[in-house]
Image: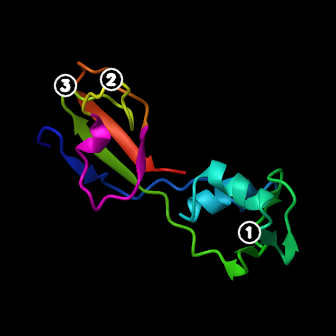
Amino acid sequence: MGQGSCLPANGSPPRLHGMADEKGERIAKVLARAGLCSRREAERWIAAGRVAVDGKVLDGPAFNVMAANQVTVDGKPLPAREETRLWRYHKPSGLVTTHRDPQGRATVFDKLPRDLPRVVSVGRLDLNSEGLLLLTLAV
């Protein structure tokens, strides 16, 4: 891999335990994973009465959703859940592993291809470190 390159990881993407377990998954995480908004924004949508589960408008974000539940936002069903994906990135020295740097330094995320969805790093590397960095979808 060349310096600063970003490629899909070889093999099958990892599958996370999701709504299939008996506890379900928090509603804000479900909305974020659907790609509609961030978890914080989801909490605001819930407070505004925009989110319903099985036809009942939620009054707070402390709600776990099961696979059998039907979630709607503004009366529309959620889009299909995106599969978990993983990318590997060869981080060159001199890039910060953060989305925004208050000191204005170049970041790993500034250098990623523009057609890549919003991703987050799995761990970090120091500014002067070079090496493998794993990226996954932001949720």
Q: Gap in Å between the C-alphas at discs 3 and 1?
A: 43 Å
Q: Which residues are magenta?
A: 107-121
Residue 112 in the image, given as x and y percentages of width and height: 25, 48
Type of the residue with mark 1: Ala
SS class of the residue under badge 3?
A: loop
Per the image, the residue denoted by label 2 is 103
Disc 2 packing (10 Å; few <14; some 14–19; many ≥20) = few
Q: In the image, is residue 120 above or below residue 13?
A: above
User: Mark 3 belongs to which amino acid?
Assistant: Ser
Q: Looking at the image, tell me whether mark 3 or mark 1 is earlier in sequence order.
A: 1
Please name the colour scheme applied to the rendered image. Answer: rainbow
Q: Is residue 101 magenta?
A: no
Which residue is labeled 3 in the image?
A: 93
Specify the quadrant of the image occupied by residue 3.
top left
Q: Residue at x 64, y 54 (%)?
A: 41
Q: Looking at numbered disc 2 in the image, what kind of residue is underneath it?
A: Gln
Q: Find residue 125 and report its image quarter.
A: top left
Q: How far apart are labels 2 and 1 at the CA level?
A: 43 Å
Do the numbered discs 3 and 1 sit on residues whose CB atoms are within 8 Å? no
Q: Which residue is painted at 35% across and 31% down in the image?
A: 97
**Residue pushed farthest bottom?**
76
| In this picture, residue 2 sits left or right of residue 128 | left
The answer to whether residue 6 is above or below residue 130 is: below
Residue under circle 1? 67
Which callout, 2 or 3, points to the residue nearer the camera?
Answer: 2
Question: Considering depth in this image, is 44 or 109 the residue closer to the camera?
Answer: 44
Give the mark, 2 or 1, whose residue is nearer the N terminus.
1
In x, y percent, where is residue 129? 25, 21
Disc 2, SS? loop
**Callout 1: SS:** loop
